[in-house]
Each structure stands twice: as C-alpha cells, then as structure tokens.
Image (spheres, coloured by chain):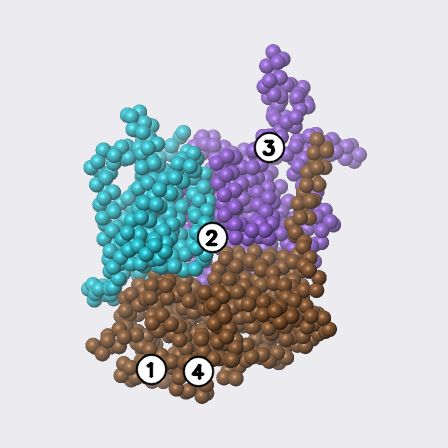
Amino acid sequence: MRDYAWRLSKNFQGEILAVPGKAIAFFFLLFLFFVPVIISNPYILRILIFASIFAIYAASWDFLSGFTGQVNFGHAVFFGVGAYATALLNLKLGLPPAATIPLGALVAVLTGLIVGIPALRLRGHYLALVTLAFPIILTGIVLAFPNFTGGELGLYGISPLSDSRVLIYYIALIVMIASVLIMWKLTDAKSTFVRTGVILHAIREDEITARASGINTTKYKLLAFCVSGFFAGIAGGLSAHFLQIAGPSNLTLFFSFQPIIWTIFGGIATIYGPVTGVYILYPLMEILRGVIPQLRMLIFALILIVVLLFMPQGITTWFRDKIEVECPRCKLTNVATRQYCRACNAPLHLEQRLEQR
Amino acid sequence: MKKGLVALLVVCLVAVALIPGCQPGPEGTIKIGVIGPMTFVQGEQHWMGATMAADEINEAGGIVVGNVTMPIELVQIDSNEMLSVPDAATAMEKAVTVDKVDFLVGGFRTEAVLAMQDTAMDHQKIFLGCGSASKEQCVRVAEDYDKYKYWFRITPINDNLLVMDSFLILDTVISVVKDELGIEEVKIALLMEKAEVGDLIVSACEHLIPAMGEDLELVGTWRPSPTATDVTAELSAIKNSGAHIIMTYFSGPVGIVYAKQWGELEIPAASAGINVEAQKMGFWDATGGKGNYETTLNQYARIEQTDKTIPFFDKFVAETGEFPTYTAGTYDALYILKDAIERAGTLDSDAVVIELENTEYFGSAGRIVFTSTETGNPHDLMWGPEYVTGIGTQWQDGELLCIWPPVDGSWNGLVYEGTVAYKVPPWVIDYWEAK
Amino acid sequence: MFANILINGAITAGIYALLALGFSLIFGVAKIINLAHTAFYMLAAYFIFTFAYFLGLSAPLSATASIIITTAIGVGTYKLVIERIREHETAVLMITIALALVFQESILLAFGSHFRSAPSFISGHVELLGVTVSIQHILTFGVVLVCLLGIWMLLSKTKLGIAIRAVAQDREIANLVGINVGTMCLITMAIAVALAAVAGAMVAPLWTIQPHMWMRPLVMVLAVVVLGGLGSLKGSFVAAFILGYTVTLVVFLFPTISFIKEAIALTIMVAVLLIRPEGLFGVAFEEERL
C-alpha cells in the first residue's frame, strides 16, 4: 500500500510536475476545484459551469473532426438531441437528471449513427457541407411537431440539476474532467491499453494504408461519431437541466460554429486544446459584455483570424512549444528552460549540441 | 518554475476576481436593470422607453421611499437573447448578482424570457416583462405563486388576447371589404408565420371563421418561416385561391418581405392582422413605400388612448426618431414600479409585489390593471374597453393611422379620437370590379 | 396552379443560381470554400443602400459602384487573409466564417440592425402565363442567364479562361507551362466576388437588407453547390432548379408546412448524395494519396 502511494507520488512528480503543460493543467484543475471556496458569486459560478459544459461540447467536436478529419459543421445536432431527449425524459417520464442525462446522451449516440452512416459515404468538403444541413433539418422537425417539442418556445420547466449552485458547479466540473479524460485517453496514440488512439491517428494520416493494414476504418469512424455524439449529448443534457429549458436556439448555425471556433483557437486534434479554448474565450466574452458589448463579436472574429493566420496550430500548441522541449534522444518532455534532459542528460537545444561537438 | 506556477495561480485568481468589475453605485439610488437584445430594435426601444421615464422621474426628484427620496439609476443589460438563450440567462444573473439591480424591466423573445424569468425568480427580483406575449409566463405565477410572484407583464397583452384583437380587426376589415367590393361572400386566406402566436391564431381561425357566418370561407393556410426571405410563391398561391382578405401574423423580418411583395405584385386581397415590423417608423422606407395599406395590431399610434398617449408619443418620436412600439412599454413599467414602491414605502420585493398587485394606472396605452391571483394567469394585463385594448393601425400614404376600435363605434361604443376608416387598397378594388 | 409552380419555381431557381455561381467558380478553380460568399452579397446590398439613400444615386449607378467596391474588398481580403492559408482547406473554411462575422459586425456597428431596402431597377409587375411576376424577378432571371453565358464564354473562348481552366484541372502542370497560378486564383476570386455583388444588386431589392441576411442564403447556396457537385457550374445550375422547384412545390402542395421548405430541400440534397456521393455533376473521388 505504502509502496503504491510512493509510486503514485513519484509518478506525479515525474509525469505531471516536470512537464509544464501537464503541470499547468493540473494546477488549473486544482484551482477550479477551489473556486467556490473563494468566490460565491452565482454569476461567476454560472460562467464557469457553462465553460465546463461547453468544454465537453468542444472537446467532443475535436474528437470527431480533429482526430478523424471528418469535419462536422452540424455538431449542434448532437448537443440539441441530447438537450431535447433529456428534457423529454424529464418532463414526460419524470426521470431525475442522473438518469435523463446519460439516456439523453445515448439518444445522441443513436443520432451519431444516423448521421454517421450516410456521412461515411462522403469525403472531404462534401461531408463538411452536408453535416451543416442536419441541424437545419432537425429544426424543421422540431418546428413541425410543436406539441411534442414545444415548437419555437422549446421545452421548459425541466427540473434543475440541484438547488445549490455550488453543487451544480461540482457536478459540471467533475463530468467535464471525466469526459475529457476519457476522450483524451481514447485518442492517446501512446496509450498501451486502448488502441483507438493510434488507429484514429493512422486513419487521419493515411486512410488507405490503415485499411491495408487490416483496420476496419469504417468501424472506427462510426465509433468516432458515436463517442463524439455521446459526449456532445452529455453537454446538451447538462445544459438543459442547468438552464431548465431546451429550445431550438440549441440548433442554430452559429451554435454549430462555436465548438469549431473554440477548438481552432485552442488547438485542433489535442482534446485539451478545445478545453483551453473554451476556458479562455467564454469568460473573455463575458468580460467584454461588461466592457464593450457592441464590439464583442467583432473582437471574437478578429481573434479567430489572428490565431488562424499566425498560430494555425492553436494557442495551446503554440504556447506548449514555447515552454516545453522534447529530448532529442529519449523523447521525454522537458521544461524549455532546461539545458539538459532530466532523464538522459542529453543536451536539449541545438546550440548546446553544436557546442558539445 | 514553482514561482512561475504560483504567479500563474495568482493571475488566475485576480482575473476571476476582476470579472464582476464590482462598482457599487452611488448610495441611495434605486437600480433598475433594463434587459433586452440591445443590438436589435426591440432592445433599443426597451432602453429608450426606460430612459425617458427615468429622466422624467429623476427631474421631478425621484422615487419617495418611506421618508427618503431616491433617484433612479438605470443599468443597460444586453441579453443577446436573439442569438443565445444561455447568454440571456447569464446576463440576467450578472444584472442581479454583480450589478446588484433592485428591479428589472424588459425581455423579448419568449424562449429567452422563460429562462430569464427563472433566473430572476431564483433571486426573488421583481421582473416586469415588456416584450414577450406568452401567457405561460403568467400561468407559472398561478402554478407556483411563491416562486413566480415577482413576475408581471406590462406589455403586450397576452397571446390569447392578441388572437382576440386580430379577430376584432378582421371583423372590421370584413365589413369594409364587403361594402367597398360589393360582395356578399368573403374568402379569407391565412398567411401566418410559423410561431407560437401564429399557431394559436390558425387554430382559432379554423374553428371560428366557419362559425362566424355562412358568408365567410377559409380558402387556405400558408405558414412561412419568420425569417423567410421570399413569399412570392405564397402570394401567388393566395391570388389563385381567390381570397379577398389575407389575415396575417408576422413577428419577424418576413413581415417586411410580405408587405413589400404584396404591394409590388398588387395581390388583390386586403391585408389585416399582425405585422410587428409594420409598427416601426422604418417600415415605410424598408418596404420602399410598397407597404402602403398594410395593417397591424399595435400598441401605440398618435391617438388619445389615455391623456398620456399623445405627449408620450410625440416626445418619444422627438427624442429617438422612432415610433414607440410595445417594447417601449418600459416607460409605463417604470411609472408603475414607482407608484408601487411609493405605496409600499420600501424596496423590499415582497412588499412591492403586494402593491404592484393593487396597481391601477393610466398608462400611455390604456388603463393598466393586473389580473388577480384568483385567475389562471395572475399578474397579466386586464383587457377590455375599460382597460388596455390594443389598437389596429394601417399605413395610409406614409402615415400610421388607427383603424380599430372602428370609427363607427361598433365595438362597445369605444372610439379613440383620431381614428380613421380602414382603406381597401385601390388595386384590390380595381381587380374585383373588373371581374 | 401548374403555371404558378412553373414560373415561381424558375424565379426561385434563378436567385439560387445567381447566388451559387460565384461560390462554385472559386471552388472549382482555387479549391477555396468561401463561406463569406454571401457576406459579400450582404456588403453589396448595404453599399447600394448607402449610395441610393444617402447620396441619392439612381439604382443602376448605385449597383455599379457597389459591385466595384465590393469586388475591391473581396480582392483585398483574398490578398491579406485567404491567400496566406490557401493550402489549408479547413483553415480556409474557418477563416471565411470569421470574415463573414467581421463583415456582419462591422455593418451592425455602422447601420444598426434596422431593416433596410434597396431600390428596384424597374418596379411594377407583369402577367406571365396568368401568373403575376415582378419585373425585378424577371430581370434577375435574365441576369443569371447573362452571367452564366458570360462565364461560359470567358472560360471557353478566351486565353484567360483557358488559363483559369488549366489551373482548375491541374495546378502543378499549369504552373509548369508558365501560367501564374496565384494571379489566376486572384482573378477568379475577383470574378466570384463580383458575381456575389451582382446577386446583391439584383436580389436585395426583392428581399430585405439587414446584417444577418447572409446566413440563410448561405445554407441554400451550399445545398445547391453540393448537390450539383462541387466546382461544377453546370451542376450548380441544374441543382438550383431542382431545389428551387422543390421549395416552390412545398409552398403550393403543402402550404401549412411551407416554413420547413428549406429543411425539405436539404433533406432531398442529403438523399441524392447518398446515391451519388460526389453530387450530380461532380467528379467521382479517386482515393488519392498525397
């Protein structure tokens, strides 16, 4: 037992504290856990709750589009289906949030299959542009059956996640961390116990070679649609219970663009990139609302253009490259300020390598 | 490195602490939040109506609370509700917990108002609705009085009453059309945007029009989207149907498209109903004058609904260059609130709610009394000849004139001074005379 | 009713075709999916409004001025922004959305969200096969045909057109035979934006002008272009007719659900793509390896 704890702490020191990116992520999460202790203002908690919900949403887009290259322009469909299904289960069957959110997410998985199967026949831009149609078609269905879906008013009177804002905060935060960790593990190409990461990478880099190596690429792409749908559905369900309303505004064109923007800003094909993107951009938008509400969207769009032009890999990758350096010999990640690798003592920077020679 | 991390943590903390940007207002003011889609016309009108009232009240000294007089401080809150419902609820929470407003007025889009209502009620803040017509908001008051009692609707009349008013206007138009066209049997086409109120009117029409008399026939129902950009196909089909009257409901931009194409194509049917865009001064230019003879249910026109209407109307036009529409009802909302606070002698929400329930106020658009807690929809507007009625207005050669209650006094003998007769567009008369 | 469907469908198809033409062209040549295409259409409409209302210019003069300015803006944004990341196709998608948002917000700041209107070239209406049609609608349809013919002439009869087609077919080879690929893309972008501006000049008087007016047409433009096959002008034209007639049929046959006419058109698009994943006239995908 003590041995295990010792190894855990050693691991913690070696795997997390020594790698700046992971260390920052760790301390940021730690910080998020203590926010309600420091601040009790429900407004700030609300912003952070939405940030958690949208972090799941954005990461789920990245999981599908960043990792398999299947650019989805209609991601709102999954979020919306999750929200509507959750709302209906709660309102019509009276199920509690603990049941409605996972069930709602399963309905979103089903949607993932419905959207994914035809989408797989399409390639490249066709897929991107066709996925754009799905939320609009779904909006049509929602409006055509107002007795069931509430029409343009949406479904309201959904029971709250909890009466305590702090509790809601922790629910959203923990669900967010769990979802993001699962998606991150599933996409981790270095992982030894799930193969999906390395397969998804292979599909994105060269689908034909992947297929030639005996990988059923269709199966894995469909899996990506389902997993992505599941987590976007979770986000939609959380949002429905938190806002206590699920309406067609969940299905707008702009709401489909949102996760793309967050992901591009944060860094595509990373999972942590979109999460960072949301945690920076969403509160930033709120600050701008207070300062210069008229210029909010303009600034938002300009930031996006600047990032795309000058940091096409996204802000996290750009920042990580500034603070981390990979050891050229043993491939271990080091703090950029180090001269020599912490494990094998090889010189990390080109100048030193030249000097040594 | 550790130092760096500590520094980072401090930066995060400071950033979070700065978000609210807490600026406590000057002591002894009453903070009223005006919440609405501020980048849209509806929100602009919320703000204009409220600033006019606040300036007037402050010039007169302020609001007497017990034995102190306090000025009003308005806080503008952009809900962004047209684009995002989460934003609207967040904006509401910011207003209450960060800006620390005492009362709220505004709200427009129903889906967003329901979410904002929940947030305001959670914080037990009085929220005077000035834009959404959904009866549901008041039904909630009946269902859970303790939670929702802080909600009141100042404008417009609720959706069921909007349907009622539409029918009354239709009735007036039918009688004029019969006279002018010299016909006995009138065919009516429904062109109603896909929206909740539209659904209500359509189902009401499908039941009521056949029941209203042998001489009325419903020839068809067309339901374009609120944001449709083209309704020529619909208009073409309506012309084919042989309709004499198009009964409309439009709350979105499609209202402008409709009026423009209806006038351009000279569709031979008189138009009557609700067209929110036609309530605005910009309507005439937006349709390039093609919207002449378009008719809409309205809240304001330059007629004497009460002795306050014309002074309010003129001042509003002079200050803003716009006609007031129903979201400018924030003007009345502030006065109603002022009276209730003065009667209660305190800013305490619960005490003010009790006084608001006793409101009897001659506002800019009629006598405002709230429905009682005995009804199924408390805190809603009372409607009728002695209360708020709503008016029918028609564009006649660049001017927006009142045509309902009818000039002949056939509706409960009520005629507002300045009312004119409904005009059937000349091309409609020409077309049917040629037949 | 048949005549109504025939004529109203053609009119709708004409508008879709005009909006989609430029979009299809720039994709065909430079492989740029320009989601800001309808935003240029919006800009053109606002320039016309400005010239007509604030400077009092006549409709054709405002339209001409507006087309020139919009094209200049289009070329400027291409040079400053799009060209730098032209090779990254997904990045182009994103950046053109961002550009569209920049245009929308700038217009919102300058003009507010009020609805505006542009003057028609010729007002009034005529009877065609017993159907009332506004002259502006007929004019729009004529302009579509002229634009199509013009583009076709340009591409098939001129040296410039042949160079543009060469770039569209194989960029490397075109480069090898001495065609300046960058200039060709720039010229095509200019033509595409000019076509969007022409659409603005023709369609804006029929509809209303407001800062969010680009979103709804964008969806239909994408549907037309995808259904027709990306980059195929002929395909776009045929698809515009299919979708134009679809929405018109919905209005005439199922009037009570005409609010979902676009959703129905999109469903048809998805259904067709299930059978032909490359669109009606698109080139079938070869599984290229880079």
- For chain A, the rendered hue is purple
Marks 4 and 3, how far apart at CA? 73 Å
Place of residue A267 in the rendered image (x, y in percent of width and height, measured from the top left): 54, 38
Label 3 in the same subunit as label 1: no
Disc number at residue B417? 4
**Label 3 neighbour load within 10 Å: few <14, some 14-19, many 20+:** some
Disc number at residue B176? 1
Amino acid marked by disc 1:
Val
Disc number at residue A320? 3
Output the letter for the chain in cyan.
C
The label nearer to you, 2 versus 3, is 2
Q: Residue at 74% of width from left, 50% of height from top?
A: A37
**Label 4 neighbour load within 10 Å: few <14, some 14-19, many 20+:** few
Disc number at residue C109? 2
- Res. C70 visible in picture: yes
- For chain B, the rendered hue is brown
